[in-house]
Image (spheres, helix red, strand yellow):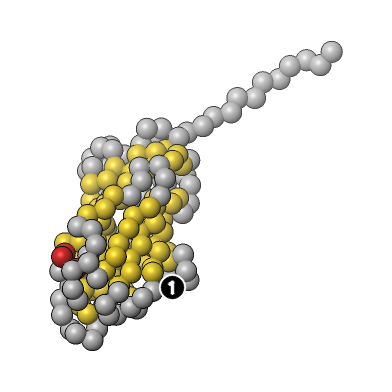
């Protein structure tokens, strides 16, 4: 695998999500191997959040082109006070020439408060992978970018007030 032979991108728009929203989108991470198929042992993302904000639940990446959905797991407990934590996807096989568009999804806790915000980042150094035909380890220099950031997503607790009034 040679430098710049693995193209990566992180797209998405910052927006608001509601409390207790399932499968909220935190952007799309795209990866394309151009030199050979890759076996990805693990690839880490970092979840950033406000201190004293509940973490996301049921985090996963889903390929928009039907190549599967994979759980994002944390190697350690994500505490309420933490502002960042590593989450990991394991055991991916990426075919040469196929653009994998992984949408990062998570469930917003039902007790999340307005002002809570989240975003994910990715770093090439966090990828443990090998080329299938060459059996060479992938290094950070093999990627088109060393680090990427996804959009910032904020919780907005909207309310609606209903009032009665007499009809004349």
Look at the image and tell me in which quarter the C terminus lies. top right
Left or right position of 95 against 141: right
What residue is disc 1 on?
67
Seen at 30% across and 73% down, the residue is: 33
Residue placed at 34% from the left, 78% from the top?
95
Q: Looking at the picture, does residue 161 appear above or below residue 80?
A: above
Q: Give the percent coordinates (x, y) of residue 87.
A: 27, 58
Front residue of 35 and 115: 35
Residue 140 location (% of width, % of height): 16, 64
Image coordinates for residue 97, horizontal then vertical, percent: 36, 76
Whether 4 is drawn above or below 87: the answer is below
Q: Position of residue 150 (x, y in %)?
A: 33, 49
Identify the residue shown where x is 27% and y is 80%: 36
Q: Quadrant of the N terminus?
A: bottom left
Q: Quadrant of residue 98?
A: bottom left
* Closest to the observer, 157 or 76: 157
């Amino acid at each position: 695998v040679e430098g710049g032979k693995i193209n990566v991108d992180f797209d998405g728009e910052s927006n608001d999500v509601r409390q207790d929203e399932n499968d909220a989108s935190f952007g799309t991470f795209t990866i394309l191997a151009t030199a050979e198929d890759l076996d990805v042992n693990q690839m880490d993302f970092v979840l950033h959040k406000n201190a004293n904000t509940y973490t996301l639940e049921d985090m996963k990446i889903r390929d928009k082109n039907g190549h599967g959905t994979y759980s994002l797991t944390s190697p350690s407990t994500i505490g309420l006070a933490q502002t960042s934590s590593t989450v990991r996807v394991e055991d991916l096989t990426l075919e040469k020439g196929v653009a994998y568009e992984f949408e990062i999804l998570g469930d917003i806790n039902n007790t999340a408060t307005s002002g809570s915000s989240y975003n994910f980042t990715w770093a090439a150094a966090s990828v443990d992978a090998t080329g299938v035909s060459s059996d060479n380890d992938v290094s950070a220099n093999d990627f088109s970018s060393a680090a990427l950031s996804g959009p910032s997503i904020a919780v907005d607790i909207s309310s609606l007030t209903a009032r009665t009034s007499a009809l004349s």
